[in-house]
Image (cartoon, rainbow, N blue to C red):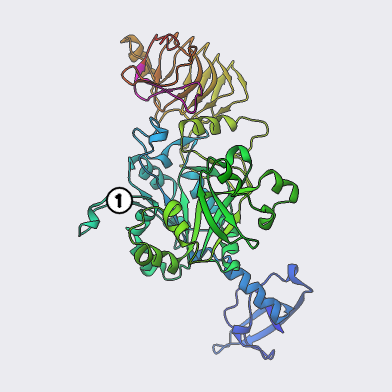
């Protein structure tokens, strides 16, 4: 038997119980069983007496060992997360014209990087590297403002690692892919701070989802897998847009297929009940797709990057498929909301989906909050407006306007008789004073925000955009693509969809009829 002690203010135990100090562990006696209280006087060398109140609970040795083992498998101190900043973000252009993909605003008040960062914090993981390469200035600034683990998270850290040159020919290259980016910083996993690290969690910086990574880690460790991949169940309508996996009856990954179609797609169907789906749901979703969220045993990852596949550049398309025959790769089912914010279409639709009732994803979860930079902004000022199925972020000023199925970002200024519909407005980085606004108008220039009598439909309005009075922005002619950057906007579309406008930042748009292109 193991006897557990609950006490306060006690450093050392003495007495006739026959137990040495190492046999005692703090527990909550109220939760674990019948409570026995007693007092004991301890005479120290300086004859100072102190009273000790103790709670004893008997726990079978086998149960204690099992509990210790479970706790060990959920110890976040032995996990380091690596968030990949992504490439040039061409499919998200022009949102990535001056910012990295993880720095793209989402949901009115957040940035995409806040999603994996918040998931790490809520999971107890406080050792995080972010690998960046393109347009990383705003991302680095946001990370510095929002996440300072040195103050509030003990021995944790958040470090942004940019592509850099090192001695030798190989050291002069940019990151060539996800695996190459991690390889270029592989030495970090062997320094003093990583001595206790057992597993490396690889994450993407442009996904929208809420996940407890320690559930993922625990499943990985319990299975004994070398690599575990988080995957989504898929139906026929979406499966061909993803890389799919084939698993055996125990969830081990046997093969991969990248965006299969026709007979190749049907060949990738699996029994998803193996991963925990009900029989009914498994029949609707017979495919599993990779989320781009992986966990590796540290030693396995280093071996793969340095010795087994030293020239492979990508995890998803090269290293992991090639490792399936040699290593134990397991699938982990994540059956919840997840979206890859990798294109203008997915960005636009994911933002507007936040306005649904109920929404499939919500930033409002008190138990697992989404964190971001602390801005100390006042509540929004809404004067005589009609707002329907929309999100209005803090620090905004809305006057006599109609906001319909839209997301309005922080510090937005929307003047009278403005109608926004199906629009994502990213807000502003700063306020202009009343004096500055008056001066701009007197000079015939346009303040930040949206001027009077303006109608906007199906538009992404970038940060700090200036849209004047009496402007109409609506793709009434169904134009698919247009680059009018000199006039302050682009039209982007995908797969034949009607184009979305993107009004770029810091460009004056005054009295232009965008609908008559």
| Above or below 187: residue 10 | below
Q: Nearer the viewer, residue 13 or 489?
A: 489
Q: Residue at x 33, y 9 (%)?
A: 442
Q: Could you say which is closer to the camera, residue 213 or residue 148?
A: 213
* Residue 392 pos. (x, y %): 55, 27
At 53% from the left and 40% from the top, the residue drawn is 241
Determine if residue 5 is in view: no
Which residue is painted at 66% across and 79% down in the image? 51
Q: Give the class, few, some or many, for how many residues have Cα within 10 Å of label 1's Cα (few <14, many ≥20).
A: some
Q: Residue furthest right?
A: 34
Secondary structure category for the residue under label 1: loop
Q: Does residue 32 show up magenta in the picture?
A: no
Q: Which residues are magenta?
A: 489-508
Residue 247: x and y, percent?
60, 57
Let me know if residue 334 appears in the view.
yes
Nearer to the camera, 483 or 207: 483
Residue at the far front: name it: 263
Answer above or below: position of 426 versus 507: below
Q: Please identify the residue farthest to the left as the structure is shown.
A: 168
In the shown orientation, is residue 241 left or right of residue 97? right
Tell me the residue that label 1 is attached to. 163
The reply, left or right, for residue 209 in relation to residue 54 is left
The quadrant in which the C terminus is found is top left
Quadrant where the image shows the N terminus? bottom right
């Amino acid at each position: 038997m193991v006897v557990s002690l609950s006490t306060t203010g006690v450093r050392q135990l003495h007495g006739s119980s026959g137990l040495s100090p190492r046999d005692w562990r703090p527990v909550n006696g109220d939760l674990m069983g019948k409570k026995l209280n007693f007092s004991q006087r301890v005479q120290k060398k300086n004859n100072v007496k102190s009273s000790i109140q103790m709670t004893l609970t008997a726990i079978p040795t086998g149960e204690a060992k099992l509990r210790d083992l479970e706790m060990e498998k959920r110890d976040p101190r032995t996990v380091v997360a690596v968030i990949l900043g992504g490439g040039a973000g061409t499919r998200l252009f022009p949102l990535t014209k001056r910012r990295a993909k993880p720095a793209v605003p989402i949901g009115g008040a957040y940035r995409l990087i806040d999603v994996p960062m918040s998931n790490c914090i809520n999971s107890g993981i406080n050792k995080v590297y972010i690998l960046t390469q393109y347009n990383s200035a705003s991302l680095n600034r946001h990370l510095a403002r929002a996440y300072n683990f040195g103050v509030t998270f003990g021995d944790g850290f958040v470090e942004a690692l940019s592509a850099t040159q090192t001695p030798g020919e190989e050291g002069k290259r940019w990151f060539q892919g996800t695996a190459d980016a991690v390889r270029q910083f592989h030495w970090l996993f062997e320094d003093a701070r990583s001595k206790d690290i057992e597993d490396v969690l690889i994450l993407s910086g442009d996904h929208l989802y809420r996940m407890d990574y320690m559930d993922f880690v625990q499943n990985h460790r319990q299975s004994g897998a070398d690599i575990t991949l988080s995957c989504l169940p898929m139906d026929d309508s979406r499966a061909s847009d993803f890389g799919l996996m084939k698993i055996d009856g125990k969830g081990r990954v046997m093969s991969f297929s990248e965006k299969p179609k026709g007979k190749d797609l049907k060949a990738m169907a699996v029994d998803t009940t193996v991963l925990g789906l009900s029989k009914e749901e498994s029949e609707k979703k017979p495919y599993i797709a990779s989320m781009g969220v992986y966990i590796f045993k540290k030693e396995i990852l280093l071996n793969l990057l340095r010795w087994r596949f030293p020239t492979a550049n990508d995890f998803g398309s090269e290293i992991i498929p090639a490792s399936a025959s040699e290593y134990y790769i397991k699938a982990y089912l994540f059956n919840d909301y997840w979206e890859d914010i990798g294109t203008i279409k997915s960005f636009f639709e994911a933002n507007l989906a936040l306005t649904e009732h109920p929404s499939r994803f919500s930033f409002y979860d008190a138990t697992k909050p989404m964190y971001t930079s602390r801005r100390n902004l006042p509540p929004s000022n809404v004067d005589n407006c009609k707002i329907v199925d929309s999100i209005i972020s803090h620090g905004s000023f809305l006057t006599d306007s109609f906001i319909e199925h839209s997301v309005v970002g922080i510090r937005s200024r929307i003047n009278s008789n403005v109608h926004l519909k199906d629009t994502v407005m990213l807000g502003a980085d700063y306020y202009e004073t009343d004096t500055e606004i008056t001066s701009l108008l007197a000079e015939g220039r346009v303040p930040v925000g949206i001027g009077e009598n303006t109608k906007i439909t199906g538009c992404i309005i970038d940060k700090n955009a200036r849209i004047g009075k009496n402007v109409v922005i609506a793709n009434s002619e169904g134009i698919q693509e247009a680059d009018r950057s000199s006039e302050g906007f682009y039209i982007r579309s995908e797969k034949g969809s009607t184009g979305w406008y993107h009004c770029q930042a810091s460009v004056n748009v005054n009295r232009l009829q965008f609908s008559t292109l």
